[in-house]
């Protein structure tokens, strides 16, 4: 029978018949009984136990799937202790468990969780944002969450929330941005200034910086997004800093954002991008970035020179010629010196890579050459 429908349970009903240890089965069974109790203290203790057991165990997340409905009911209790205990238990139940995510949404958790985003209690707001981050990772739940009107509230958290809530909010927005039509809706909430603020304050190699850069790359695909980024003081510089010192994936998003801008209107965005000293980072990406980053960096370098196209198709510009062309336009001795130094390093790295490649080929070829030679001598 349905756990929520009555108070008579069997081991098969609660889904613990496959638990090998009797003690574990008993613990799950008793906890599921208690979460249905009329005693508020026992319900809270049961929720805390579910949270503890499901924190790192996929098996327990399955065993406690029938606790979803009573936990969701606790979210509307108007008691902080109730709400926090239930919210944290549901958060752990939803981690890396697609079925539980869907069950939590279907049980009606979304409305109270979204209300918590506006709670004066910062703890509930933090837990709610973390819950939405986990729930929004599912392709099945994204359309439902997107239709709930949560995006403006997430942007408000991004503006006013705690440090951790801001990180969780931007990651949730990124998750939702991958669903059709959401990018335009996110753009309408004018989030870029808050994304830039977070990007400036977080470690450039962090996961939050990666999601910020990814969101920016997507949003600058729209004219309003490009205008917002260039209007924000230090906006382009923040992207350039990620391009220089972010993770490999972050740098790929950063160079992608700048390339999108330059491709959309080279005359408008070329100077603002050059002014922030992007060349050294681009040079490094052409050698050390991901394959996609290398391609994007080389394309952007071509767009940043005086003439974006080769003078002769028969003699296309080398990367060194393109950069030399840009160097001649750079103002400021410090940036000029740094760019020249990076160019020299790039050439050196390229030469070293070529030498290693030749050495590896020699090692591979030598045994075959020797065997052929030995065969001829015999």
Image (cartoon, rainbow, N blue to C red):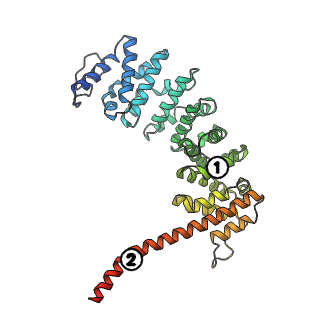
Residue 54 placement (x, y as % from top left): 36, 29
Q: Residues within 10 Å of mark 1 (few under 14, many from 20)?
A: some
The kind of secondary structure element at disc 1 is helix
Q: In this view, does 135 lie to the left or right of 173?
A: left
Q: What element carries label 2?
A: helix
Q: Which residue ends up furthest to the top in the rendered image?
A: 39
- Residue 38 vertical placement versus 101 (above, below): above
Disc 2 packing (10 Å; few <14; some 14–19; many ≥20): few
For image coordinates 63% across by 37% down, the residue present is 189
x and y percent of residue 284 in the render?
60, 59
The residue that label 1 is drawn on is: 241
Closest to the observer, 286 or 32 = 286
Decide if residue 364 is in sight here: yes
Q: Residue at x 22, y 28 (%)?
A: 21
Query: In this rendering, would 61 be left or right of 127?
Result: left
Q: Label 1 to label 2, Cα distance in Å?
A: 43 Å
The mark found on residue 61 in the picture is none
Give the labeled residue for mark 2.
Answer: 365
Q: Position of residue 11 (x, y in %)?
A: 22, 24
Q: In this view, does 96 lie above or below 291?
A: above
Left or right? Give the position of 58 relative to 118: left
């Amino acid at each position: 029978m349905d756990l929520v429908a009555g108070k008579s349970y069997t081991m098969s009903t609660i889904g613990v018949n496959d638990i090998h240890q009797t003690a574990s089965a008993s613990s799950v069974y008793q906890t599921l009984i208690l979460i249905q109790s009329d005693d508020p203290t026992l319900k809270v203790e049961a929720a805390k136990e579910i949270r503890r057991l499901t924190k790192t165990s996929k098996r327990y997340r399955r065993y406690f799937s029938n606790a979803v409905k009573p936990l969701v009911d606790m979210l509307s209790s108007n008691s902080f202790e109730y709400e926090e205990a239930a919210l944290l238990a549901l958060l752990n139940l939803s981690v890396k468990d697609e079925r539980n995510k869907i069950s939590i949404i279907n049980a009606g958790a979304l409305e109270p969780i979204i209300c918590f985003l506006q709670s004066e209690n910062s703890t509930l707001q933090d837990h709610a944002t973390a819950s939405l981050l986990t729930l929004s990772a599912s392709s099945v739940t994204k359309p439902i969450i997107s239709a709930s009107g949560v995006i403006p509230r997430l942007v408000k958290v991004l503006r006013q929330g705690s440090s951790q809530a801001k990180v969780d909010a931007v990651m949730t927005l990124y998750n939702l941005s991958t669903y059709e039509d959401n990018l335009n809706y996110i753009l309408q909430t004018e989030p870029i200034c808050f994304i830039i603020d977070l990007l400036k304050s977080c470690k450039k190699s962090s996961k939050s910086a990666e999601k910020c850069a990814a969101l920016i790359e997507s949003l600058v695909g729209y004219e309003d997004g490009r205008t917002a980024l260039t209007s924000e003081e230090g906006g382009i510089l923040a992207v350039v800093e990620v391009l220089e010192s972010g993770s490999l994936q972050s740098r790929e998003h950063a160079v992608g954002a700048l390339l999108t801008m330059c491709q959309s209107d080279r005359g408008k965005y070329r100077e603002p991008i050059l002014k922030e000293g992007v060349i050294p980072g681009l040079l490094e990406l052409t050698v050390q970035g991901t394959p996609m980053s290398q391609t994007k960096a080389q394309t952007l370098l071509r767009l940043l020179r005086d003439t974006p196209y080769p003078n002769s198709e028969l003699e296309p510009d080398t990367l060194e010629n393109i950069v030399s062309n840009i160097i001649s336009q750079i103002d400021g001795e410090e940036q000029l010196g740094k760019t020249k130094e990076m160019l020299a390093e790039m050439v050196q790295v390229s030469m070293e890579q070529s030498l290693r490649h030749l050495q590896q080929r020699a090692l591979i070829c030598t045994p075959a050459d020797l065997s052929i030679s030995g065969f001829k001598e015999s």
